[in-house]
Each structure stands twice: as C-alpha cells, then as structure tokens.
Image: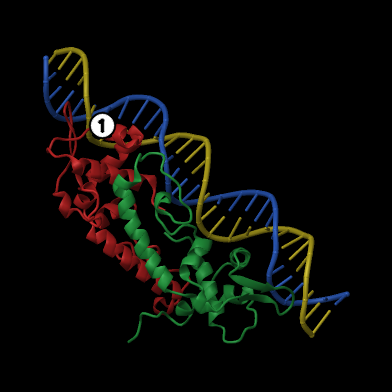
Chain colours: A green, B red, C yellow, D blue
DNA sequence: TTATTACCCTAGTAATCCTATAGGGATTAA
DNA sequence: TTAATCCCTATAGGATTACTAGGGTAATAA
C-alpha cells in the first residue's frame, strides 16, 4: 500500500504542475485545496525540494515551484523519492537491492521470478507516465 | 513491500506444489528447507488452510497438502489471502475498495488514475502466473 | 493403551513505520 | 520593521511486523 506521504506528495506535485504561470505556490494553498494537513505537507514538500524535484523561494510571495518541465519528470522518480523502492522485494530492486538472508539462489527462487515480473510491469507504467500526464488528467483516457 | 509472511507463504506453497507424490508435507520439513522460523510458518500454513488453499492431515505421517491442482491456483488469490489488496490504494482496489476521505472526485484524481494503471498491470502478471508456474521455475524463461 | 507426531490456538512483545503535531529559526518582499 | 513563508528538529501515539512462548488437541503406530 502507498503511504499517505507518497499520495499527498504526488497530489501536491500535480497541483503545482497544473499552474499555468511560473509563480511559486504556497504550502497553505495546496494543503487547503487538496485537504492535507498543513504541517505534514510542509515536511513532504521539503523532502521533494531536497531531492531536487522542487525549488523553493522563501519569504512573502514565496513557495514551491517545479525546476524541470513536468513532461520530463517520470513517475518512477517521484515514487522512488517518496515511497522508496518500486519493487516489492529487496532482492528484485534495481535501486535498493539487498540479498535475502534465506534463499540460497535467486535464480531458482519462485518468489523472486514472480516479483521480477511484477516490478517490470510497474516500472513500465510509471516510466510511461510523467507529471505532465498526471496534471492533464492522464494520457490514457482518449475518449 | 511484500511482508515476510507473504513471501514465506508463497515459498511454502511452491514447495508443496513441487512434491511429485500426493503425500502431506510436514511444517518442519518446509521450515528447514526454506529457512523459515518453524512457529511462524505454522501460523502461515494455518491461514492458508483456513482460506481453503491447503488441506491438512494430523498425526504421524501428517502434514499439509494442496487441495486443488497447482495450475488452477492463480497468484492473485494467493497474494490476496496473504498480503491483502493488490492495489496500492484503497480507492483503486477491486476487493477491498474504500473511498478516500480527501479527494472529492476519483475521476479527476491524478493519483487514482495512475494507480489504476499500476493495479491493472500487476493483476495481469499475477493472474497469468499459477502456482504450477512457480513450482516449475517460471513460465517466462524459455531458453 | 501409550507414546509419538503433528496440527491448532492464544498471548505477548520488541522493533519499526506511519502520520502527523509542536515549536521555533531563517529568509525575504513590501 | 513586519508579516509571510520556507526550513529544521524533536517527539508522540497508534498500527503493523515478525516473530516467540507455551501450551492444547487430535490422530496414528506400535
């Protein structure tokens, strides 16, 4: 299950990406619009800033803004920053790999091969979707 | 991330499915072979039995055995019993649906549409794999 | 019947993660 | 200077995880 942190983070990023002008968006505005605890959201946006996904401007009229074009921000990157590994097991993770303590051989492990397939399918979906797709309502709904 | 419970449960099921004869397999044998805490495994196998995936025979020479043909047991079912919902958010779950408290409209929610795609891709993989596939080492490796 | 084997069940617990809340410090525009 | 805003740390209650402990119950072989 996705944590609330990740869910709120994605919603906030999409909110910022929807902005037509380039002006920074305040935490309080996002919190109000998306029904998120203000303080909690603050910590999430800070994390996204430190990860290089957002820029911030302090002081009156400040706020958070996107550094890159939303079309260039893949959802794989967003999920990894907020939630951590996309794989469901450390032994099938690309970026957070860990060997299992049990399991003498991954190649013959039944769980490993199954979860590899799940990971690849998730990677494809998340790699095909950018923040721009989310902000525009999703690329797959073409009717 | 998959819980150890789920991981151990899958490994145990695959171990039982690998058996050529129909004789029950003892908990202690599986625990030893798959490096799983005996008592913990006991609780997992019990859960699988109560969910209708395994049968059990008591007494000397007893143990757990599969009720159905491994080819008929989809991994979707196994995961749902052990881990719970396959979806990463309650609002995109088929079997465990819950509305979000925030989020006035799911149709326009950016997270919802993304996670729907992830869920569908996971469902496809898990639906295409049966316990028989796991026991035989995976259907996709044909070289 | 008796001993053995193995399933069945209940409780508890240390560690970790989640979801915030609280309180302030630093920076900037006006 | 003043108000708005981001920045940072600490902490706390609750839930979940991953077991462990300790037995009870049922079936079987001898």
Quick one: quadrant of the C terminus of chain A? Answer: bottom left
Give whichever of A4, B19 is nearer the camera. Answer: B19
The picture quadrant where one finds residue B94 is bottom left
Residue A40 position in % (x across, y down): 59, 63
Callout 1: SS: helix
The picture quadrant where one finds residue C24 is bottom right
Q: Which residue ends up furthest to the front in the rendered image? A: B143
The picture quadrant where one finds residue B114 is bottom left
Residue D19 position in % (x across, y down): 41, 35
Residue B110 position in % (x across, y down): 45, 75
Quick one: quadrant of the N terminus of chain A? Answer: bottom left
Is residue D13 placed above or below A123 in the rendered structure?
above
Q: Chain of mark 1?
A: B
Q: How would you rate the neighbour count of disc 1 (Cα within 10 Å): few for under 14, some for 14-19, many for 20 or more? A: few
User: Residue beneath label 1, please?
Assistant: B29
At x 48% / y 64%, what residue is drawn?
A79
Asked whether the viewer can see residue B84, the reply is no
Give whichever of C1, A70 is nearer the camera. Answer: A70
At x 49% / y 75%, what residue is drawn?
A131
Give whichever of A39, A76 is nearer the camera. Answer: A76
Is residue B90 placed above or below A73 in the rendered structure?
above
At x 39% / y 74%, what residue is drawn?
B113
Is residue B99 placed above or below B57 in the rendered structure?
below
Residue B87 position in % (x across, y down): 36, 63
Is residue B46 placed above or below A5 in the rendered structure?
above
């Amino acid at each position: 299950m996705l944590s609330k942190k990740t869910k709120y983070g994605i919603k906030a990023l999409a909110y910022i990406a929807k902005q037509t002008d380039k002006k920074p968006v305040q935490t309080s505005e996002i919190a109000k619009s998306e029904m998120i605890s203000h303080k909690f959201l603050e910590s999430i946006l800070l994390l996204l800033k430190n990860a290089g996904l957002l820029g911030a401007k302090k002081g009156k009229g400040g706020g958070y803004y996107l550094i890159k074009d939303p079309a260039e921000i893949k959802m794989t990157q967003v999920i990894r920053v907020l939630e951590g590994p996309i794989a469901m097991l450390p032994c099938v993770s690309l970026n957070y790999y860990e060997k299992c303590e049990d399991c003498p051989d991954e190649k013959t492990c039944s769980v490993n091969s199954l979860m590899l397939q799940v990971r690849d399918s998730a990677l494809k979906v998340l790699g095909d979707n950018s923040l721009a797709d989310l902000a525009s309502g999703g690329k797959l709904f073409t009717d």
